[in-house]
Structure formats: structure tokens, C-alpha cells
């Protein structure tokens, strides 16, 4: 069954929403996560993604890539990469640099951002012209934010390395270079998972609500759809060797069925080599 343009865009949003959280780790924590994800709609595989995270010596570096496959790759030329780096200060991630390159249909967007203490200090973008009814971005929308990729990880709550319900209770202020939006997480339930390779054990499942702030088209059907309190979920699993949890599964509903992004591999390859992989330079 052919996918409508709106459904195809929702699949793209699922990749974005899997990037929806906040990073905070003790300076001494270190580890390296390699994860692979399959993307499906109504049980049909339509894409894949890969996530890599290195943490060590008070710094972090992370990258993600994704692309369409099968029938979806014929209908939509969808693929992208992103990378981010930053420092860990006062137990939280402070982004230093972010870059992304995303292609959808015949549209290609590339951007680079530099940060200072949670505020965008430099933004270079090659992208399509904004919609005429775009909600204006103000200076305030570029402050007190985190980039989508640094937002892939959340800290465990409490004093012990145990998944807890209140880990979900947070609002994530995200700026992707074009749009400013909030992702509000709340606890839904505990569950268990088993990847084909790597992690098997408990996960915490967070309900997720999307709230657009600025930079989007006021008439966007997709934005309206996502803002209507849909039953969206993010599932988080722990990264061994750190006090971080990372997305294991994301679920976003559409009129044709749920778009699901789920880990087939979720593996901590090394806890000692991570620091040597982090250069601290801009991606």
C-alpha cells in the first residue's frame, strides 16, 4: 500500500522524536554505546538508523545516521546524518557544536550550530526557504535549549543505577536550527526488552507530548497532528558504565498505523576506549 506524503513525513518525524531527551552524567562516567534500529509501519520495514555515543573525561560525542529502505526509499528520498559534541558540567550535558545533513524528497538541509552555555552563538544553514506562514523565531528561542542529538540521552534519577519512574518527568526544550519545540515526558510504565544483539532487561516507558514553539508553519498538518495529544512513547534502556539511559524504542501513531523505531542492537562495546574517541573539536 503506497504511503501518503503525510505518512512519509511522520516517519521522518519518528527519527527526530527518537532524539528527544536530555543528557546528564557524572564526570567520571565513561562508556561507548553502539545501537542499530529498524523502522517499521504496520509491521513493514521501511528504514533503519544507527546511533553511536562516546562518553569520557567529562566530555561526550555522539552521532546518528538513518535512511529509508524498501518501498519507502522509492516513495521518499529520506536519509540523514547528525553529530554533536559537548562538555559535561555540573552533571549535565552542555553542547558545544552540532551539525546535520538531511535529505527528504528533493529537499536537502545542512546546518551547523555552535553553543555557549545552552545558547546558540553561531548558526550556518543551507536549507529551503521557510513557509510564508512560519511562526517567527525570537532570540529567546535560541537560549536555554539543547540540540536534538545531545537530547538523545537522559540521566538516571536517584542515587543508584536503577531505572526509576521519575526519570521520565521532564520537559525537553529542543532547537534543531529551524524549529523550537518542547517534548514533555511523563512516566507510563515499566517493561522488559531483549535486543537481537546486546541488551536484555528492564526499560522505563515514557509518554511523550509534542508542543511546537516557533519556526514551524502555522498551517502544517503534521504539526497539528502531533500536537493533538497522540499516544506517543519513548522506551529507555541503561548504558552500562554510565548513569545514562538511551532510547530503545519510539512509537508514533499515524492514520495508517504506528511508526515504530526499535533497537535490534543495543550494545556497550567498551567502557575504557570511549575517552580516547572524544576529541573535543567541533564535528
Image (tube, rainbow, N blue to C red):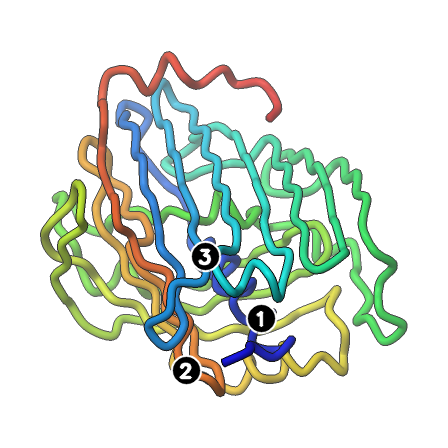
Instruction: Decide if residue 239 is on the left or right side of residue 114.
Output: left
Instruction: Name which residue lies at 52% across and 50% down.
Output: 67
- Judged from the image, the secondary structure of the residue bearing numbered disc 2 is loop
- Looking at the image, tell me whether mark 3 or mark 2 is earlier in sequence order: 3
Which residue lies under the disc numbered 2? 257
- Expressed as whole percent of the image width and height from the top left, the position of residue 255 reads 49, 87
Split into 4 quadrants, where in the image is the C terminus? top right
- Judged from the image, the secondary structure of the residue bearing numbered disc 1 is helix
- Looking at the image, tell me whether mark 3 or mark 1 is earlier in sequence order: 1
Instruction: Name which residue lies at 43% across and 73% down.
Output: 252
Instruction: Name which residue lies at 31% across and 35% down.
Output: 34
Mark 2 surroundings: few (<14), some (14-19) or many (≥20) residues within 10 A: few
Residue 216 lies, with reference to residue 106, above or below; the image says below
Instruction: Decide if residue 120 is on the left or right side of residue 149.
Output: right
Instruction: Decide if residue 159 is on the left or right side of residue 23.
Output: left
- Expressed as whole percent of the image width and height from the top left, the position of residue 120 reads 70, 41
Q: Nearer the viewer, residue 16 or 134?
A: 16
- Expressed as whole percent of the image width and height from the top left, the position of residue 6 reads 62, 78
- Judged from the image, the secondary structure of the residue bearing numbered disc 3 is strand
Instruction: Name which residue lies at 42% across and 71% down.
Output: 259
Of the numbered discs in the image, which one, if any, rests on residue 57?
A: none
Tag 2–tag 1 contact (CB < 8 Å): no
Q: Nearer the viewer, residue 55 or 199?
A: 199
Which residue lies under the disc numbered 1? 8
Quarter-of-image position of residue 129: bottom right
Distance, label 3 to label 1, CA atoms, is 11 Å
- Looking at the image, tell me whether mark 2 or mark 1 is earlier in sequence order: 1
- Expressed as whole percent of the image width and height from the top left, the position of residue 55 reads 35, 27
Of the numbered discs in the image, which one, if any, rests on residue 47?
A: 3
Q: Nearer the viewer, residue 114 or 258?
A: 258
Distance, label 2 to label 1, CA atoms, is 12 Å
Amino acid at each position: 500500500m503506497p504511503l501518503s506524503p503525510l505518512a512519509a513525513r511522520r516517519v521522518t518525524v519518528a527519527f527526530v522524536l527518537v532524539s528527544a531527551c536530555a543528557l546528564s552524567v557524572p564526570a567520571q562516567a565513561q562508556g561507548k554505546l553502539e545501537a542499530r534500529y529498524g523502522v517499521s509501519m504496520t509491521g513493514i520495514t521501511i528504514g533503519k538508523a544507527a546511533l553511536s555515543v562516546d562518553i569520557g573525561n567529562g566530555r561526550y560525542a555522539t552521532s546518528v545516521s538513518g535512511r529509508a529502505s524498501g518501498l519507502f526509499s522509492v516513495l521518499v528520498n529520506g536519509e540523514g546524518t547528525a553529530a554533536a559534541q559537548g562538555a559535561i558540567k555540573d552533571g549535565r550535558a552542555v553542547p558545544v557544536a552540532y551539525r546535520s545533513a538531511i535529505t527528504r524528497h528533493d529537499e536537502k538541509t545542512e546546518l551547523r550550530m555552535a553553543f555557549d552555555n545552552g545558547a546558540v552563538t553561531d548558526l550556518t544553514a543551507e536549507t529551503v526557504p521557510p513557509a510564508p506562514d512560519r511562526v517567527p523565531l525570537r532570540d529567546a528561542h535560541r537560549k536555554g535549549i539543547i540540540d536534538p542529538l545531545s537530547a538523545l540521552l537522559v540521566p538516571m534519577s536517584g542515587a543508584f543505577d536503577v531505572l526509576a519512574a521519575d526519570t521520565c518527568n521532564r520537559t525537553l526544550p529542543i532547537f534543531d536550527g529551524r524549529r523550537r519545540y518542547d517534548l514533555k515526558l511523563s512516566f507510563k510504565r515499566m517493561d522488559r526488552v531483549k535486543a537481537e544483539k546486546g541488551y536484555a532487561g528492564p526499560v522505563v516507558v515514557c509518554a511523550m507530548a509534542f508542543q511546537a514553539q516557533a519556526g514551524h508553519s502555522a498551517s502544517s498538518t503534521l504539526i497539528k497532528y502531533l500536537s493533538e495529544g497522540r499516544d506517543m512513547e519513548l522506551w529507555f534502556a541503561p548504558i552500562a558504565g554510565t548513569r545514562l539511559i538511551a532510547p530503545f524504542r519510539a512509537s508514533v501513531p499515524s492514520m495508517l498505523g504506528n511508526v515504530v523505531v526499535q533497537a535490534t542492537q543495543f550494545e556497550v562495546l567498551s567502557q575504557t576506549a570511549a575517552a580516547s574517541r572524544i576529541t573535543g573539536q567541533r564535528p
